[in-house]
Amino acid sequence: MWAPRLAAALALAAVSAPPAARAADPVALGRELYVERCVLCHGTRGHGWEWNQKVMKPPVPVPDLAETVPRLKDDYLRAIILDGGEAVGKTRFMPAFRFNMGEGEAEALIKYLRSVAAGSARAR
Ligand code: HEC
């Protein structure tokens, strides 16, 4: 059950981070958003593992983002993040985030996912 605690701790850190610094570094903002909203299902490194530590487990396999993101286009990533799995022909077990996420935040998440896939960033 460390993941929710980690997420809560990092969410607090995000609140206290200077907004200018966050805006200047989209990868850092993307990392904060990932830890806050994606880590429970996708794991700390996007691998979607560590199921024993999750509070919820989707009934469909969660793709290894570190592996699939390099093959995916920005348009696809933007659509699935903002409008959910069904927007790209997958299931609704990948939720839509548009109701509380701006386009800029989605762009930051995409930059972060690409940096994780490239091995240059970690969610922890
Ligand atoms: C409730 C669990 C859950 C949460 C929270 C979640 N996802 Fe997902 N995500 C999934 C599942 C399940 C799939 C696979 C859906 C399918 O195959 O139908 C998926 C698929 C994806 C894919 C598609 C990968 C591919 O190979 O096609 C991306 C990208 C993605 N998620 C990014 C994110 C991001 C970024 C966040 C946070 C903003 C997030 N997800 C939050 C469960 C989740």
Image: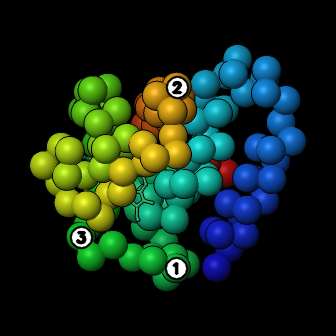
Residue 111 shows up from this direction: no
Q: Residue at x 32, y 26 (%)?
A: 74
Query: What residue did someone put label 3 on?
Result: 60
> Decide: marks 3, 2 in contact (CB < 8 A)?
no
Q: Earlier in the sequence, mark 2 or mark 1?
A: 1
Which element type, helix, strand or loop, lies under badge 1?
loop
Query: What residue did someone put label 2 on?
Result: 104
- Give the number of callouts: 3
Report if the beta carbon of the residue with label 3 is closer than 8 angstroms to ligand 1: yes
Query: What residue did someone put label 1 on?
Result: 55
12 sits to left or right of 79: right
Q: Earlier in the sequence, mark 3 or mark 1?
A: 1
Classify residue 76 by image quadrant. top left
Q: Residue at x 54, y 54 (%)?
A: 37
Structural crowding at the residue carrying mark 1, measured as other residues with C-alpha within 10 Å and reported as few (<14), some (14–19) or many (≥20)? few
For ligand 1, the image quadrant comes to: bottom left
Is 119 above or below relative to 50?
above
Q: Amino acid at mark 2?
A: Gly
Structural crowding at the residue carrying mark 2, measured as other residues with C-alpha within 10 Å and reported as few (<14), some (14–19) or many (≥20)? few
> Decide: marks 2, 1 in contact (CB < 8 A)?
no
Residue 79 shows up from this direction: yes
Q: Residue at x 75, y 53 (%)?
A: 10
Disc number lying in front (2 or 1)? 2
Q: Amino acid at mark 3?
A: Val
| Nearer to us in this view, 91 or 49 | 91
Structural crowding at the residue carrying mark 3, measured as other residues with C-alpha within 10 Å and reported as few (<14), some (14–19) or many (≥20)? few
